Image (cartoon, grey):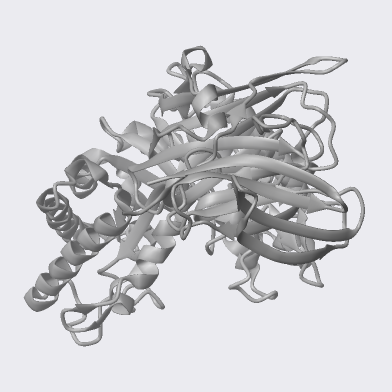
C-alpha cells in the first residue's frame, strides 16, 4: 500500500511582534459575469500572452488565430490540429476567453494572398465536392478544439467584408452566396458541439470590417438591402467587428470615426445580439518613417507614438459613456480588444504593419513601453473598476474563509475557472508582514495546472505543476498589508482545481510553520500535513548564519539515521532547498534533523500508510 507522509506541524494565523499584529486570512472568492460589463483584451500576436499579463494584467478576452483550412487539412480527410490547439490552449492557460477564427472559403480569385481552400479541392465553396469537404473539416475542427480546450468563441471566415470585397458596388450576389454558406456552416459547427454534449461551450460570431460609410458601399444601404447579413447575425451569438479607419475631416488622433463605425453596426445590423470589437488599433510607423502617414495607408489610424497615446486617451474618454444604456452603443458592446500588445516581429522592420503595439522594440531588440501603454493601462483600469462596466462581479464580503486548512496544508477545496469573466480565486491578505531578508510563496495543488499570481500590483505566472515554490521578495512590502490573489487555470475550461496549501514564508521570521518540539526557525518543511506529492518527497528549506557544512537527515526515535542528504558546503546565507525521499520509510514517528555549524534543529514528522 502506498504510504502517506504526514508532517505534524501547526500553523499560526496570528503573529504578535513588539510593533504590530501579524495576521493571515485566505478567502475563496467568486467572480461572475457582469451582464452590463465590458471585457477588455488584446490580439496578442503572436502568442504574446506573457507580455499582456506583465504590462496589463490578467485579461478577460483574447482575440487569437488566423487558422486556415488549407494549412490544417494536409491530405483529403487528414487533419493536423496541433498548432491550433496549442495556440488556443495558451489563451486558456492565461485565464482568457478565446475569440478565435478559422478561414475556409477565401481564394486568391477574390482576395490575393488569402487562399484557404486546399489545392486538392475545386477552388470555390459553391462546388459540391468542396462544400462537402469544408463541412467535414469544420466539424472536425470544432470537435478537436472543444475536446482539447473546452470552450470557444469562433469566427468562420474572418473580416468577410474586405476578404470578399463586399464593400464594392455590385457585390450583392457574392454577399448572398457567402451568407448562405455561413448559415449552413454555422449549423454544422453547432451540431458538432451538440454531438459532444458541449452545445453551450461554442459561440459563433461573424467579423465584419472596413468603412461602411465609404462611397458606394452597399452595406451602408442598411438591413433592408442586405438580408444576407441579417441572416448571418441571426444565426450567430454575437456580431463582431474590426475597425482601423479614420476620416480626413478629423485629426488622426481623433477616435470619432471609430465610434461612428461601432455605432453604425450596432444600430443597423446587431439586432438582438451583443457586439464585440475584436480588433482596433493605431499604427506608429510614422515614428520610424516620417514619410508614412495615414494618407499613405488608406486613412487607417496612423501616426507617431505620441499620436497613438492621444488617440487612445480620446477613445477611453468616450468609451465608458458611449456604452452606457443611455449612450450611443446602448450597452451592447461586450468586448473590446486592441491590436496589439507588442509590435509584430513577424513583420519586417520596413513593413508598416509591424508598428501597432503599445510595446515597442528598439534598434537593439529591447522592449520598451510606448507612451500609449500608460494611457491604455489607466483606461482599462478605470473601466474595470466601474461597477457598470467591470467584466465580472465580485463581492469580497461573501468570501469563504479557508485560512486554517490552507495554512496547515490540510485543505482540499475546489476552485473552478470557467472563463475569463467566470471563475473562483483565492485572496490571501497578510497584515503587517514582518521584515525579512526574503519571502517565498508556497502553493500546492492536487492536479497539474497553472497559477496566476497578483501580488501588490505585480502579475506573475507559473505553469504546469502541482507544487509551486517561488521567491516573491521583490513584490512584498514589509510592515504593511500585502494582498495576494491566486487564479488557478488550465488549457481546458471549465477547469476545477483542488488547492491544498498556500503560504508566504518570510526568511528568518517564523510566520506560520513551526515544530511542536521547538520554536527554532532554522528550517521549514514543505509541504505540511498531509504531503500532496505523488512520490512522497519532502522539501526542506533552510538558512544558515554563516558558510559551513550542512547535514540534513531523518532519524528515528532511537537517533539512528534512516535517510540522509549528503553534506553540503553552504556559501550563502540565502534560503537553501533540499529534497529528501521518504517513500522507503516504514510508518512511524521520525525527526528531520538539520546540523548547521554545530547547531542542531529538529522537526517531527509522522509517516502513515
- Picture quadrant where residue 34 is located: top left
From this view, report whether residue 18 is shown above or below residue 457. above
Describe residue 593's horizontal placement relative to residue 146 as left or right: right
Which residue is at a point 24% across and 57% down the rendered structure image?
147
From this view, report whether residue 440 is shown above or below residue 328. below
Q: Position of residue 556 (x, y in %)?
A: 58, 49
Residue 445 seen:
yes
Q: Position of residue 191 (x, y in %)?
A: 11, 52
Which residue is at a point 78% across and 42% down the rendered structure image?
522
Quadrant where the N terminus sits is: bottom left
Q: Position of residue 165 (x, y in %)?
A: 35, 63
In the depicted view, which residue is nearer to us: 317 or 427? 427
In the depicted view, which residue is nearer to us: 356 or 329? 356
Residue 311 seen:
no
Q: Residue furthest front?
A: 558
Which residue is at a point 40% across and 58% down the rendered structure image?
88
Q: Residue furthest top?
A: 397
Amino acid at each position: 500500500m502506498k504510504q502517506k507522509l504526514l508532517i505534524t506541524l501547526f500553523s499560526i494565523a496570528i503573529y504578535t511582534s513588539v510593533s504590530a499584529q501579524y495576521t493571515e486570512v485566505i478567502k475563496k472568492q467568486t467572480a461572475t459575469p457582469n451582464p452590463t460589463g465590458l471585457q477588455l483584451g488584446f490580439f496578442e500576436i503572436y502568442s504574446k500572452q506573457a507580455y499582456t499579463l506583465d504590462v496589463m494584467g490578467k485579461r478577460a478576452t483574447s482575440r487569437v488565430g488566423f487558422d486556415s483550412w488549407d494549412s490544417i487539412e494536409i491530405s483529403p480527410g487528414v487533419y493536423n490540429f496541433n498548432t491550433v490547439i496549442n495556440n488556443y490552449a495558451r489563451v486558456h492557460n492565461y485565464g482568457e476567453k478565446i475569440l478565435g477564427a478559422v478561414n475556409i472559403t477565401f481564394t486568391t480569385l477574390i482576395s490575393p494572398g488569402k487562399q484557404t481552400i486546399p489545392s486538392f479541392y475545386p477552388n470555390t465553396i459553391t462546388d459540391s465536392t468542396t462544400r462537402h469537404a469544408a463541412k467535414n473539416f469544420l466539424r472536425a475542427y470544432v470537435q478537436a478544439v472543444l475536446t482539447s480546450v473546452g470552450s470557444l468563441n469562433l469566427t468562420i471566415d474572418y473580416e468577410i467584408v474586405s476578404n470578399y470585397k463586399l464593400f464594392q458596388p455590385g457585390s450583392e450576389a457574392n454577399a448572398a452566396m457567402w451568407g448562405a454558406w455561413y448559415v449552413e456552416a454555422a449549423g454544422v459547427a453547432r451540431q458538432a458541439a451538440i454531438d459532444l454534449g458541449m452545445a453551450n461551450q461554442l459561440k459563433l460570431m461573424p467579423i465584419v470590417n472596413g468603412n461602411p460609410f465609404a462611397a458606394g458601399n452597399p452595406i451602408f444601404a442598411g438591413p433592408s438591402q442586405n438580408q444576407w447579413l441579417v441572416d448571418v447575425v441571426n444565426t450567430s451569438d454575437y456580431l463582431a467587428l474590426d475597425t482601423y479607419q479614420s476620416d480626413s475631416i478629423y485629426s488622426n488622433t481623433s477616435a470619432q470615426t471609430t465610434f461612428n463605425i461601432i455605432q453604425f453596426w450596432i444600430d443597423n445590423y446587431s439586432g438582438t445580439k451583443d457586439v464585440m470589437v475584436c480588433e482596433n488599433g493605431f499604427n506608429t510607423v510614422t515614428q520610424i518613417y516620417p514619410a508614412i502617414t495615414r494618407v499613405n495607408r488608406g486613412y487607417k489610424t496612423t501616426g507617431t507614438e505620441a499620436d497613438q497615446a492621444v488617440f487612445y486617451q480620446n477613445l477611453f474618454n468616450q468609451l465608458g459613456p458611449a456604452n452606457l444604456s443611455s449612450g450611443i452603443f446602448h450597452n451592447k458592446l461586450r468586448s473590446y480588444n486592441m491590436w496589439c500588445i507588442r509590435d509584430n516581429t513577424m513583420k519586417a522592420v520596413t513593413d508598416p504593419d509591424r508598428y501597432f503595439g503599445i510595446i515597442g522594440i528598439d534598434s537593439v531588440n529591447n522592449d520598451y513601453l510606448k507612451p500609449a501603454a500608460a494611457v491604455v493601462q489607466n483606461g482599462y483600469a478605470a473601466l474595470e473598476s466601474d461597477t457598470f462596466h467591470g467584466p465580472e462581479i465580485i463581492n469580497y464580503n461573501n468570501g469563504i474563509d479557508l485560512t486554517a486548512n490552507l495554512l496547515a496544508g490540510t485543505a482540499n477545496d475546489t476552485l473552478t475557472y470557467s472563463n475569463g469573466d467566470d471563475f473562483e480565486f483565492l485572496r490571501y491578505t497578510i497584515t503587517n508582514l514582518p521584515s525579512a531578508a526574503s519571502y517565498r510563496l508556497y502553493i500546492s495543488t492536487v492536479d497539474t495546472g497553472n497559477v496566476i499570481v497578483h501580488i501588490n500590483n505585480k502579475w506573475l505566472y507559473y505553469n504546469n505543476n502541482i507544487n509551486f515554490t517561488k521567491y516573491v521578495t521583490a513584490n512584498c512590502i514589509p510592515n504593511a498589508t500585502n494582498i495576494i490573489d491566486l487564479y488557478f487555470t488550465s488549457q481546458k475550461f471549465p477547469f476545477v482545481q483542488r488547492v491544498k496549501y498556500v503560504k508566504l514564508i518570510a526568511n528568518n521570521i517564523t510566520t506560520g510553520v513551526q515544530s511542536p518540539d521547538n520554536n527554532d526557525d532554522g528550517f521549514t518543511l514543505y509541504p505540511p500535513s498531509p504531503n500532496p506529492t505523488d512520490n512522497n518527497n519532502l522539501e526542506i528549506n533552510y538558512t544558515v548564519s554563516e558558510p559551513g557544512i550542512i547535514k540534513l537527515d531523518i532519524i528515528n526515535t532511537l537517533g539512528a539515521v534512516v535517510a540522509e542528504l549528503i553534506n553540503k558546503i553552504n556559501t550563502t546565507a540565502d534560503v537553501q532547498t533540499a529534497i529528501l525521499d521518504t517513500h522507503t520509510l516504514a510508518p512511524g514517528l521520525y525527526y528531520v534533523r538539520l546540523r548547521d555549524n554545530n547547531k542542531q534543529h529538529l522537526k517531527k514528522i509522522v509517516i502513515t500508510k
